[in-house]
Image (cartoon, helix red, strand yellow):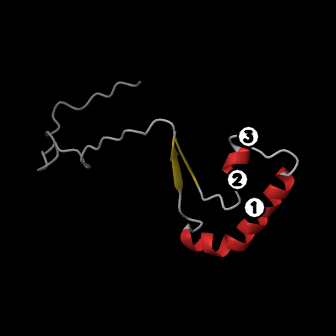
Amino acid sequence: MKKVDFPADAPPLREMPGADLPPFPEQAISPIANQVCYRPLYFEDKHTERFGRYVPCVQPLVSAGRFFGDALLLPCRLWKAPLWTFECDNR
């Protein structure tokens, strides 16, 4: 860093009222550990996709039925949880 020398005959700067206060009040932020936030998932089968639960031999029919049921209920789900909202999962 370059050292800057100020002239000795320069007048001192005026103190402004409230200059010793920070421009914004202090705020403490503490993140929540292991929190995941995501937009709504309208076509989701948590039991099959996340936990690996399935019904042998008929799982394709169960998944297809769930998908088409979700497709029919999509307008209701869009009204209940709009696209711009977030869902947070505290693990």
N-term-proximal mark, 1 vs 3: 3
- The residue that disc 2 covers is 45
Q: Which mark, residue 32?
A: none
**Residues at marks 1 and 3, CA–CA distance in whole angstroms:** 16 Å
Residue 3, above or below 52: above
Name the spot of residue 4 as percent of width and height, x first.
32, 28
Callout 2: few (<14), some (14-19), or many (20+) C-alpha neighbours within 10 Å?
A: some
Q: Element type at marker 3?
A: loop
Residue 33, above or below 49: above
- The residue that disc 1 covers is 66
Amino acid identity at mark 1: Arg
Left/right placement of residue 31 relative to residue 8 reads right
Residue 75, above or below 4: below
The answer to which of 85 and 70 lies nearer the viewer is 70
Callout 1: few (<14), some (14-19), or many (20+) C-alpha neighbours within 10 Å?
A: some
Amino acid identity at mark 2: Asp
N-term-proximal mark, 2 vs 3: 2
Identify the residue shown where x is 84% and y is 44%. Answer: 56
Indicate the quadrant containing the N terminus: top left, top right, bottom left or bottom right: top left
The answer to which of 37 and 47 lies nearer the viewer is 47
Identify the residue shown where x is 73% and y is 68%. Answer: 69
Q: Element type at marker 2?
A: loop
Q: Which mark, residue 52?
A: 3
The answer to which of 16 and 52 lies nearer the viewer is 52
Callout 3: few (<14), some (14-19), or many (20+) C-alpha neighbours within 10 Å?
A: few
